[in-house]
Image (spheres, helix red, strand yellow):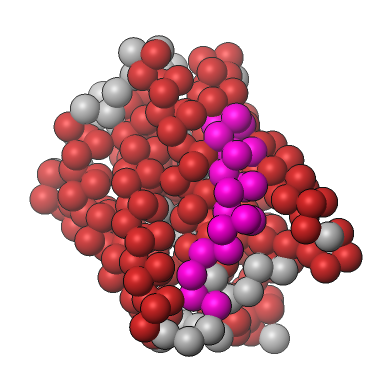
């Protein structure tokens, strides 16, 4: 598909798609990368495993727009942000190494993608915010447990190329944390771990043959579209019902995950 479109058109299509996905996903605390990887593989033709660090590069460029907007609105993840980063940062480095050394083939990778997307999509689609403000005020997850969960999510994020925030956000909201706190914390975690992931993959590309380093032109084009879309999505958060956002993203994520499960088993 990329060869048919040509370089200029490929980057334009990438930026447009990233903008649209970021507008929809950012209000839920998701960067949009969880939906972009299938788009990269199927439409842009980004090779494996380079597609994973390219997705992380999108996060590095796109998420600061949403973080800036949230800060202007007075929303900060506070201590929650630091706890998430403490787990996801080492996790994403481990996941990046696993992706290159153990999961370079498309069939196994498709099964891993399905294992991440299908549960995430079902969680988003079948659960809703607990209360008018998106949180129930219940007892939060114990901090040591939260760090361990974040590490596991970060590892999966390093394998898949999502940074981890898209898994942590619905998990935390479902556990009773307020959406206004979760969104900036999850996105800040996504940004930090994505930087670490891009660096790790770049180092691994020197040590390993093949398409391991990010596809820089594609990643930058995706990031530019996502930067504008994430800023707009953060601004729209207060105007859109949380339930509607979760249902739409959940349906899309589940459908994409089911497709990868079919490919992996075929």
The residue shown at (60%, 82%) is 106
Judge whether residue 246 is colored magenta.
no
The residue shown at (64%, 47%) is 221
Asked if residue 128 is positioned above or below residue 266 in the image, the reply reads above
In the rendered view, does 177 fall on the left or right side of 222?
left
Residue 228 spot, x, y in % from top left? 60, 30
The residue shown at (58%, 49%) is 220
Pick the quarter of the image with the N terminus.
bottom right
In the rendered view, does 214 fall on the left or right side of 222?
left
Asked if residue 165 is positioned above or below residue 237 in the image, the reply reads below
Residue 216 spot, x, y in % from top left? 56, 58
The residue shown at (48%, 87%) is 209
Q: Is residue 152 visible?
A: no
User: Which residue range is magenta in the image?
Assistant: 211-230
Residue 187 spot, x, y in % from top left? 39, 38
Asked if residue 182 is positioned above or below residue 90 in the image, the reply reads above
């Amino acid at each position: 598909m990329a060869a048919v479109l040509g370089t200029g058109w490929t980057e334009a299509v990438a930026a447009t798609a990233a903008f649209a996905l970021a507008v929809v996903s950012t209000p839920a605390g998701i960067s949009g990368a969880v939906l972009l990887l299938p788009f990269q593989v199927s439409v842009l033709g980004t090779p494996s495993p380079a597609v994973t660090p390219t997705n992380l590069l999108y996060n590095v460029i796109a998420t600061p727009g949403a973080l800036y907007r949230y800060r202007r609105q007075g929303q900060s993840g506070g201590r929650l942000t630091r706890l998430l980063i403490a787990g996801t940062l080492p996790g994403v480095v481990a996941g990046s190494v696993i992706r290159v050394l153990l999961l370079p083939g498309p069939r196994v990778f498709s099964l891993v993608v399905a294992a991440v997307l299908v549960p995430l999509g079902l969680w988003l689609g079948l659960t809703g915010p607990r209360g008018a403000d998106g949180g129930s005020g219940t007892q939060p997850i114990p901090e040591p447990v939260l760090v361990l969960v974040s590490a596991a999510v970060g590892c999966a994020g390093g394998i898949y190329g999502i940074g981890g925030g898209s898994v942590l956000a619905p998990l935390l909201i479902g556990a009773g944390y307020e959406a206004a706190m979760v969104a900036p914390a999850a996105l800040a975690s996504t940004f930090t771990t994505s930087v670490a992931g891009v660096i790790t993959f770049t180092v691994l590309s020197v040590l390993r043959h093949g398409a391991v380093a990010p596809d820089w032109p594609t990643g930058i084009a995706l990031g530019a579209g996502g930067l504008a879309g994430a800023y707009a999505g953060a601004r729209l958060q207060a105007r859109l019902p949380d339930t509607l956002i979760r249902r739409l993203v959940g349906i899309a994520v589940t459908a994409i995950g089911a497709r990868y499960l079919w490919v992996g088993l075929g």
